[in-house]
Amino acid sequence: MKNSNHFLSVIIPVYKQEKTIKKDLKLIDKTLQQIRYNYEIIAIVDGTTIDNSLKEIKKLKLKNLKVFGYKNNHGKGYAIRYGMAKTKGDYIAFIDSGMEIDPNGISLILEHMEWYDADIIVASKRHPASKVNYPVDRKIISLGAFLIARFLLGINVHDTQAGLKIFKREVLIKVLPRLLVKNYAFDLEILSVANRLGFTRIYESPIKLNYAFDSLTHATGLKTIYSCFIDAMAVFYRLRILNYYDDKNKRKWIYNPELEMRINTGK
């Protein structure tokens, strides 16, 4: 029997996943069938002309699945924000496609959400109960993000970059219209802005992660680290120097109704 007190929306950003996306979505749906809550799965294809991901998803006959997409690739952060604006749940989560993260973690972060009465739960590779297998270059990126998050942005969690998080809807209603980052530092921005606005009940949950792809090349790895650092410094500048995210600067926010207009009503 499903619990009707809460409704869960799960967003899946999809980029170049035509070979695995059907299997991924079936596994996520199977996992969510076991939870106590009614749910919806929202797949966002981040660039419909890049491959056949959208076509593959449309072959699925899952009653709780919705699929959206747009022509050009804009980055993971943009895709998640786009998906958030399509949700109707009072709990809203996202998980990376590719299934490097065990989807059973969705149930775990949901239980943590209720246990702590949290605003946000982040799956953490650094949680003592986590089981992780990922390469050194990814560990360096994760460590760099942790240092920036802790000492520059004031986020008191050990891992901001794992691709599994859950939010109360009221957090996103306040936070989404203020966000700018489309890619590398999206997680840092959404967590730091939420924290700034008083949503400080941010806790960590264990994760099971097996990074299946090859490590980044040296050049690509350096570029990713550099891009993440630049984006994070921009978040710091807007947060600490410009106070851009504060209510008093609302007229300066780059509001995108395509992304944000529906988050308030869930319709």
Image: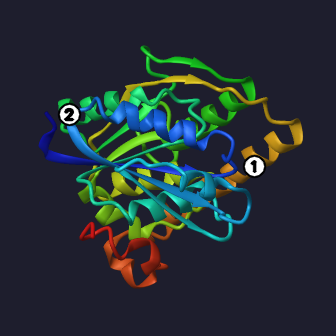
- Residue 140 quadrant: top right
Within-10-Å neighbours for mark 1: few <14, some 14–19, many 20+: some
- Residue 97 quadrant: top right
The one nearer the camera, 115 or 97, is 97
Image quarter hosting the N terminus:
top left
Q: Residue at x 78, y 29 (%)?
A: 214
User: Which of marks 1 and 2 precedes in the sequence?
Assistant: 2
Image quarter hosting the C terminus:
bottom left
Q: Secondary structure at mark 2?
A: loop
Is residue 210 visible from the viewing direction of this image?
yes
- Residue 172 quadrant: bottom left
Q: Which residue is mark 2?
A: 36
Marks 2/1: CA–CA distance: 42 Å
How far across and down, in percent of the image, does residue 144 sit? 63, 37
Is residue 183 visible from the viewing direction of this image?
no
Q: Is residue 100 left or right of residue 90?
A: right
Q: Which residue is mark 1?
A: 226
Q: Is residue 81 left or right of residue 136?
A: left
How far across and down, in percent of the image, does residue 27 sit? 47, 33
Q: Residue at x 25, y 30 (%)?
A: 111
Q: Amino acid at mark 1?
A: Tyr
Q: Secondary structure at mark 1?
A: helix
Q: Residue at x 50, y 33 (%)?
A: 159
